[in-house]
Image (cartoon, grey):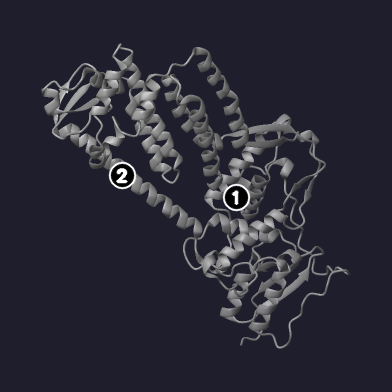
Amino acid sequence: MLEYVLKSSACMIVFLLFYQFLLEKENMHQFKRFFLLAALIASLVIPKLVFTEYVEAVPSTVSVVPGPAAQQVELSTAQPISDMDVVNWSKLFWSLYFFGVLGFGLRFGSHLYQILHRIRKNQKLRGKTVTKVLLEEQLPPHTFLRYIFLNKEKYEANTIPGEVMLHEETHARQYHSFDVLFVELAQVILWFNPLLLLFKRNIKLNHEFLADRAVLNEKVNTQKYQNTLLSYLSRDSEAKYQSIKMANAINYSSIKKRFTIMKKETSKTSIALRIVLLLPMTLVLLYGFSTTKTIYEISKENIPPLIIQEGASREQMKEYNALAKKYNQFLGGSISKKEIERMTYIHNLMSDKQRQDAQPFPSLILEKWPPQKSASREQMKEYNALAKRYNAMTKEAFHIKKKEVERMRYIYDLMSEKQRADAEPFPEILEPPMPPEPPSPDFTDPEAPEPPTFPAPITAENQIGHIKEVAQKGAIFYLEGERTSAAKIIEILQKDGPMNIMTRHTGDSNFVVRVSADSEVPKK
């Protein structure tokens, strides 16, 4: 969000500087009107533009992470929490932003209501193109949409000059109020950006240039017209009736520049030169403040065999530590399901060394987020959409997005056998390796380390200690033949006392722990 605000502000500054030095004092008001509106829109859109570049690539290997094993946990005491860590800065800033939107929105609504109320309660004289609203208040003439607001006493006495009427009718005929409403709404959303005030000032000032030019084109004497404008200036009315700032009205701040522009003439060559300079400036902004995304297309025919990622990557470790720290210091509020899934996924990828160096897995997750026995309906829908897209890719344009593959593999491992049978087939090029067969009872690995043994007598306490120890080494747990988590086994041991536990090494880096009820094991 901050990056977008900075980029859009930079674009606004460049456009405003271009306007200030090359356009503002030139007699090309129709072009300037559309330039200012287009510049404001472009400043908001350019930072959001993403240009995608497709590059054919032939990698030497395609690295895909394996699916997560059973949920593994490390129970530990949370780190001390500082006051700065407790503050949810993101929520604080968003709350402040929405309060600002509310405040500016109420201000906008209040001004709009005042104008509409003024239209409704006063006498109206409808014409072919405009409607005159006769006011009791001593306000200067001003225009909003097709309504021209005039003092009733002066209008009936026929003391309002024809040049002033023509000036206000120009505002109405050229729909200047739509420009003002647009920039007012933009200011409600981007209330914190002072550059919007400069855009609004320049847009309204250019409206005055347009209306003045329309009057002078009728061969009105310039000196006489300027004296007429001076006679209608009133600071008191602006201070008292703030809503006229949403309309097009005669005011002090613009009068000096308007008098200067009335005498200014711009040659066609000068106009053409300034328009030509606008093109390279816009291209520079597009290049500097948009985003370029490169997608490497890999032909299926050139994809080598998959390799399995060993441990979590540096980026994944950084992501995990940030999430784990957040939930280790968690004091209340909502828990993000996607964040927990992501944290669990990366934790299961880690090597033993990475787990020792990383933030401890949050213990509160075990209480609030028990392991899934199968994929949810939403996860199945997400998996099927991804798998269908990858299965439909042609050989000529096949590319892999790492996060999508990780997500597919995560959901695939959560599925039950029935869900896998009903789901879209896992994309052939990404097909995960089959899980190893359980070792036979007489299987021994001469190089395998000796599994931890229990001290006698067998108690629930030392069994819990054993479960925690092998969990930290990435053990896989089964309860009565069904895969489960260390947390679940610890919970049963604490409730029912000691059980029969068999720990074996499978020949790879993991222990397999099988737990079952056994009447011969003494209870506490």
Up-down relation of residue 482 to residue 276 (above or below) = below
Badge 1 crowding class, 10 Å Cα cut-off, few under 14, some 14 to 19, many 20 or more, is some
Q: Amino acid at mark 1?
A: Gln
- Quarter-of-image position of residue 404: top right
Badge number at residue 243? none
- Of residues 118 and 165, which is closer to you in this image? 165
Q: Where residue 420 appears, x then y in whole percent?
A: 63, 49
Q: Is 312 positioned to the left or the right of 19 in the image?
A: right
Mark 1 — residue?
419
Q: Amino acid at mark 2?
A: Arg
Q: Is residue 146 visible?
A: no
Mark 2 — residue?
107
Badge 2 crowding class, 10 Å Cα cut-off, few under 14, some 14 to 19, many 20 or more, is some
Q: Where residue 452 appears, x then y in whole percent?
A: 77, 77
Up-down relation of residue 524 to residue 225 (above or below) = below
Q: Where residue 45 appears, x then y in whole percent?
A: 51, 34
Up-down relation of residue 225 to residue 343 (above or below) = above
